[in-house]
Amino acid sequence: MASTSITLNDNKVALGLLVDKSGSMSAMDTREVCASLNNLIDEQMKTGKEILVWLSTFDDKYDTIYKGIEGKDAKVRRAYINPRGLTAIYDAMNTFITDLGADLRDMSDRPGKVVVVILTDGEENSSKKTDREKVMDMVREQQEKYSWEFVFLGANQDAIGNGAKMGIDSNAACTFDYSAEGCARVLRSTSNAVARAISGQTPRVEFTQEERDESQMVAPVPHHDSFELTSMPFAQNPYDEDDDEESQVTRTNAGLNSNYVFHKNI
């Protein structure tokens, strides 16, 4: 039997997104999460690399949304991340890593870089099939054998400490403020960090201290005689959430001076 030729394509990137949709994520504002995730995908395409997206969501159940779809077609929609349930992150990581690995094994022209981004606002509380040690073994195997990179983003926790317990490098873990603004900021920071690694500016995904600080910051309001920290509101979305036509809303995060585009068709 003739052997199958397998190549690693350095111009091709597998971008995995594993997104928490447990009930507590309701504080994040699904519009902003969608906009920020779509922006992250769009920014990676600007590196000139071919971006293939794997997207799954989880609470105490697991949903596969996209498997190896081209970045230009991978739009995150609110229906995919409506909050519900508990947080079975260990089971979700097990399934995501297993499925992504199987998909890559079936490709003769494989991505030369694999980056998996995990976004959660809480700690593990409901996995039934997988424990932390199993996740750590899986993460380390993919890192050591296949050079996968994992990025861990967590609110309501020490993301660096919890990421390390799952085998994720501390340079690629970031804690964010438990708010819509905090989620938008950490995803913007992640977009920048991943783009730097994909484009070769850095050898791997790693956050700067400025990006860490910004992700945990609650933006201050203008003041004169006193200093007060508060949440800075986003621009009002002019589209009714029940509008079922395709639309784009460009929204500016005042804390970042960055535009986010929300594609709506749910």
Image (cartoon, rainbow, N blue to C red):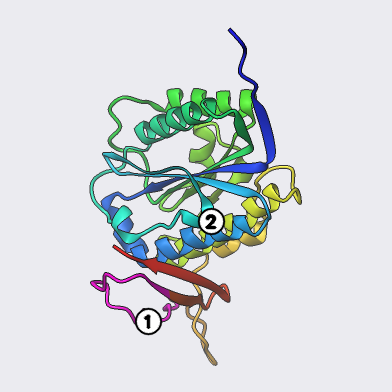
With respect to residue 101, does 174 lie above or below?
below
Q: Is residue 207 left or right of residue 173?
A: right
Magenta: main secondary structure equals: loop
Q: How many marks?
A: 2
Quarter occupied by the C terminus: bottom left
Q: Is residue 225 left or right of residue 62?
A: right
* One can see residue 36 in this view: yes
Callout 2: 10 Å neighbours few (<14), some, many (20+)? many
What segment is highlighted magenta in the picture? 232-248
Q: Residue furthest top?
A: 1
Callout 1: 10 Å neighbours few (<14), some, many (20+)? few
Instruction: Provide the residue designation for mark 1.
Output: 236
Q: Residue furthest bottom?
A: 224
Could you tell which of marks 1 and 2 lies nearer the N-terminus? Answer: 2
User: What amino acid is at disc 2?
Assistant: Ile
Instruction: Provide the residue designation for mark 2.
Output: 41
With respect to residue 42, does 157 lie above or below?
above
Quarter occupied by the N terminus: top right
Dot 1: element: loop
At a point 48% along the width and 39% down the height, the residue shown is 162
Q: Position of residue 3 (x, y in %)?
A: 62, 13
Q: Position of residue 137 (x, y in %)?
A: 51, 22
Q: Nearer the viewer, residue 9 or 63?
A: 9
- Residue 244 in the magenta stretch? The answer is yes
User: Splitting the image into 4 quarters, where does residue 259 fall?
Assistant: bottom right
User: What amino acid is at disc 1?
Assistant: Gln
* One can see residue 229 in this view: no
